[in-house]
Image (spheres, rainbow, N blue to C red):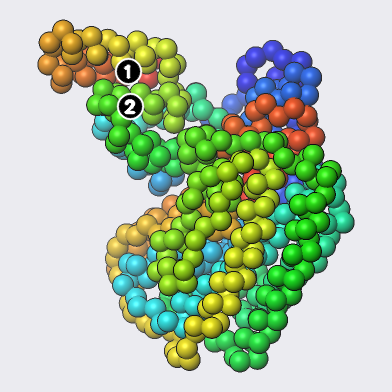
Amino acid sequence: MAEYLYEKDLREMKYIIITSPLHEVVMSELAVHYSLGRQVLRRKMINECDMSFLENIPARYEVWKAEDSVRDPVERQLGMRLLTVYIPMLPPEEMKAVEMGVRSQISEGIPEAEAYESGMDSIREMIRR
Amino acid sequence: MKRTVDVSLPIGPVHPVFKEPCRIKCETRGEYVLNAEIELGYVKKGIERIMRGRPWQEVMFLAERVCGICSVIHNMVFIEGMELIAETALPDRAAYLRVIVNELDRIQSHVLANYSYCYTIEHETLAMYLLNLRETAMDALERITGARVTCAYIIPGGVRFDLSDADARYLREAVDTIDRELNRFVHMFTTGSLIALRSKEIGILTRDEAIEAHAVGPTARASGIAHDCRLDHPTYRRLDFSPVVYTEGDNYARIMVRFDEIFQSTELIRRCLDRMEPGIIRGGSEVIAGTSRWVGEAPRGELTYQITTDEFGRVTDIGIRTPSIMNIEACVHYMLIGVLSAADVTSTYISSDPCIACNER
């Protein structure tokens, strides 16, 4: 892809997009769910998504919320499809590894809350990266 | 957009088939499109920012200036959002008049969208016929509201002007003309073998992809999703409305959904005229502090307004989600990927009826 001078840094425009009132609703819910700062989430999204994707994040988040209610609890708690399909911030294979880890911990008898927390720790680490 | 490919193909921001400026960047191998990205921001208005802190009497005019093509629905959704906060009751006659104006706006928008598509696939004859037909809808809109665009017809508690018997007769003749002429043009479209070659099985958006990107409006309904916000609207529910759905998900289906919706709109206008009783066209109440989220079906799909007001009726916060945001994203990330020819990139893009003015609100 050819590089154009004005394409080198779109961060400012992207930041304006993801600080709209509708985006703020999504950011606050995600920040609470993953115990992360909004700016950390915003930075990850700016790095990983193009502008049309960022514009569409509130709609995609709503679709995930509607869809995810019928999926299994581990996927729902970790937000597997949210972070890999609906808002693709994290690599699917790494998320799969996190999911498998949580499942194996649960099958080994570790309390669910503890297993989810360790999974969330890994996700937080990946988002901060 | 980091892979090394044969050809990097930028289209726009100024291009003969684009009504508004945007740039589509395609990674291609030969003419096969591997990846695409869209760049907007050439005509950003910052209208949400301008609205904040202003009284609703000013914001209602700003709302319809978000988009010139579908200004009526922006006006309608904002006002209905305000009515939700103020708990305003709407007179029956005003409710039907709102639907009539909204459907006329939908007709002209759909005709314009299909005109653009025909123009893009080099069928200029049909394109010009359609553009001429659009004037019939625009004239009817002007006769009822006093303006072709940004007519500020819908106001809190009702509508601005009543419809006289002469206007109603004029409107019936206009929708009859639209039906008659459009039948001819749809026949031209469906029997044109070259049109089929440029439209069928091109730019496919599957049902799952449409759900994933939250595609809305005719773009989603052409992919088999039977969702239309008019189904949840109190006035449309009284009119026995049901959405037009196709399952092919290609350019052809998207155009045909719009053609069918034009026939549906003319029928809805007739039903409104038949059921409308004489009566008042304005109610009233007082705007109070509150928050509302109201959704309406714009010609391109689901339009959402999230409004917060203070006790003086000032809009303290507002978020507008226009349908083109979802449809452009679906187009760029799904429909364009795998398109076999660079010429089909523009036609596929136009078939999703993108509105840059809506996006650059």
Q: Residue under mark 1: which chain is it in? A: A
Residue at x 26%, y 22% (from the top left corner) = A74
Foreground tag (1 vs 2): 2
| Mark 2, residue position | A79
Residue B65: x and y, percent?
59, 62
The answer to whether marks 1 and 2 mark residues whose Cβ atoms lie closer than 8 Å is yes
**Along the line of sight, which residue is nearer the eye, B261 or B65?**
B261
Distance between mark 1 and mark 2 Cα atoms: 10 Å
Image quarter (top left, top right, bottom left or bottom right) of the N terminus of chain B: top right
- Residue B273 vertical position relative to residue A3 in the rendered view, above or below: below
Q: Amino acid at mark 1?
A: Ile
- Is the residue marked by circle 1 packed among few (<14), some (14-19), or many (20+) residues within 10 Å? many
Q: Which of the 4 image quarters holds residue A122? A: top left
Question: Relative to B167, is B16 on the left or the right?
Answer: right
Q: Which of the 4 image quarters holds residue A112? A: top left
- Is the residue marked by circle 2 packed among few (<14), some (14-19), or many (20+) residues within 10 Å? many
Residue B345: x and y, percent?
73, 35
Residue most toward the right? B125
Residue at x 40%, y 55% (from the top left corner) = B306
| Mark 1, residue position | A123
Q: Secondary structure at mark 1?
A: helix
Residue B140: x and y, percent?
68, 77
Residue at x 36%, y 14% (from the top left corner) = A96
- Residue B238 vertical position relative to residue A79 in the rendered view, above or below: below
Residue at x 68%, y 50% (from the top left corner) = B255
**Along the line of sight, which residue is nearer the eye, B85 or A109?**
A109
Question: Relative to B201, is A67 on the left or the right?
Answer: left
Q: Secondary structure at mark 2?
A: loop
**Along the line of sight, which residue is nearer the eye, A114 or B231?**
B231
Q: Do circles 1 and 2 both sit on a common chain?
A: yes
